[in-house]
Image: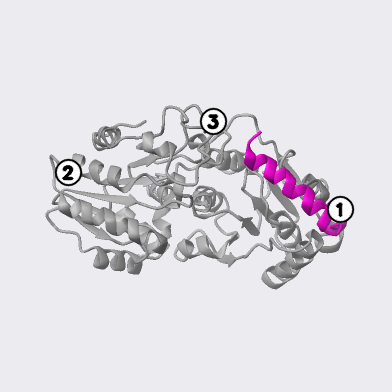
Amino acid sequence: MTIRTILRKLEWQINAIRHRDPLSPAVFMRLFGSMRRRKWSPTRTPKRVVILRSDEIGDTVSTLTLLAAMRSRWPTAKIHVVVKPGPATVFHATPTIDRLIPWTPITEGSALKRQVLTARQALRRFRLRGYDLAVLPRWDFDDTPVRYLAVASRARSIVGFAPVPDREPVWLGDQSRLLTDEIPRGDTPRLTVAQLRRLADYLGLPWIEHSQPAVGTGLFDSSDARRAAELAKLPSTAELVVGVGIGARNAKRQWPVSEIAETMAGVGESRRIAVQVLGGPEDGARADELVALLRENGISAVNLAGALTLSESAAAIARSDLFLGNDSGLQHIASSLDVPTLVVTCHPATGSPWSDNAPERFGPWSSRKALLQPATAIDGCVDECEAFEPHCIRAVRASEAVAAMERLLGGAVS
């Protein structure tokens, strides 16, 4: 048992003592749910559908694959999508969405307070009309009250993956009761998009490969593309444009700038390349360092970290011939655009495939992709990298990345 697991269990026990008793799932449904709940039938054609995601950028972007399947099967349905305010910004131009509903999960206060405030949020966002179908695509444990939001949306059918018994707070009661249809989680780790395909199969939707056409083209419009091009000012003499996603949510996921610079120098030995460095405002210092190193090596580079919105970043990635990134939201955007993608991850090859960093679950999904990871965990890490700074990821060398990128440029598929 890891320290993180022990702390999580301790937190649950403290919360169980501190919180007032919440409403049971059965009571919450009677108070706030639809009075006409029923199991889903794949033969139905819904008029109103809501997809509820409480995830960050990467998992949220992967939902484009499910949206494409829904729109193909139900062309006249009204499809609404609930997402956090941050990821919501990338969907402003997505044609498969009829209404985007930003939602800030209530994660503070007693369980009862969170339930009641979530029901109030639902009333404000959904009114009383309700939906024919609510879909919860998250496969793993969710510490937000999104299932309660789904119930309070007054959807007749609520479809989602089975709760995670050893991670669900026991004082909330049987969370399965909140769903009308529970999809088994399975005992094999899969990529997020593969889990979404299981969900599509259950709903009776024909699966459409994400590259036919690339679903990520709906993440930006012409104005996003124009602004990304204006800020980049890439030289017309460049034979190869590389997008580099320099950031990641945790420092341990960030491949050292020196290794990225050495990789770009290796790729640029036989061709003229231009590099777009992408990320958020918090990545500015590392991006400046990388750009300086690249220019010292005669490589054209521009720092776009913090200068572009998510949609503009998607447009910049779409202009790239190749993408190099950490385990982050930008690599999922690159996959959605079917750009050849190389991801460097901190997760060791010998680590647990169930980890929140495992590439078996969160790796790239472009049709041409490559993954580099430490062969084994180092210096005290076992099932995953547990450091707070770049640690296991330092075992990945620039020479490996150069070879992987050359294979991708040659059309190799991993």
- Residue designated by label 2: 268
- Residue 338 is at least partly visible in this image: no
- Pick whichever of labels 1 and 2 is earlier in the sequence: 1
Q: Nearer the viewer, mark 1 or mark 3?
A: 3
Secondary structure under tag 3 reads loop
How many circles with numbers are drawn on the protein?
3
Residue 148 point in image, percent of width and height = 74, 57
Q: Marks 3 and 2, how far apart in space?
A: 36 Å
Q: Nearer the viewer, mark 1 or mark 2?
A: 2
Q: Which mark is residue 382?
A: 3
Cβ atoms at labels 3 and 2 below 8 Å apart: no
Q: Nearer the viewer, residue 216 or 248?
A: 248
- Pick whichever of labels 3 and 2 is earlier in the sequence: 2
Q: Which mark is residue 26?
A: 1
Q: In the image, what residue type sits under mark 1? A: Ala
Residue at (52% x, 63% y) in the render: 86
Cβ atoms at labels 1 and 3 below 8 Å apart: no
Q: Main secondary structure of the magenta part?
A: helix
Q: Marks 1 and 2, how far apart in space?
A: 62 Å
Q: Nearer the viewer, residue 400 or 161?
A: 400
Which quadrant, please, contains the C terminus? top left
Up-down relation of residue 393 to residue 110 (above or below): above
Q: In the image, what residue type sits under mark 2? A: Gly
Magenta residue span:
1-28
Secondary structure under tag 2 reads loop
Q: In the image, what residue type sits under mark 3? A: Val
Secondary structure under tag 1 reads helix
Q: Is residue 298 left or right of residue 187?
A: left
Q: Is residue 162 left or right of residue 227?
A: right
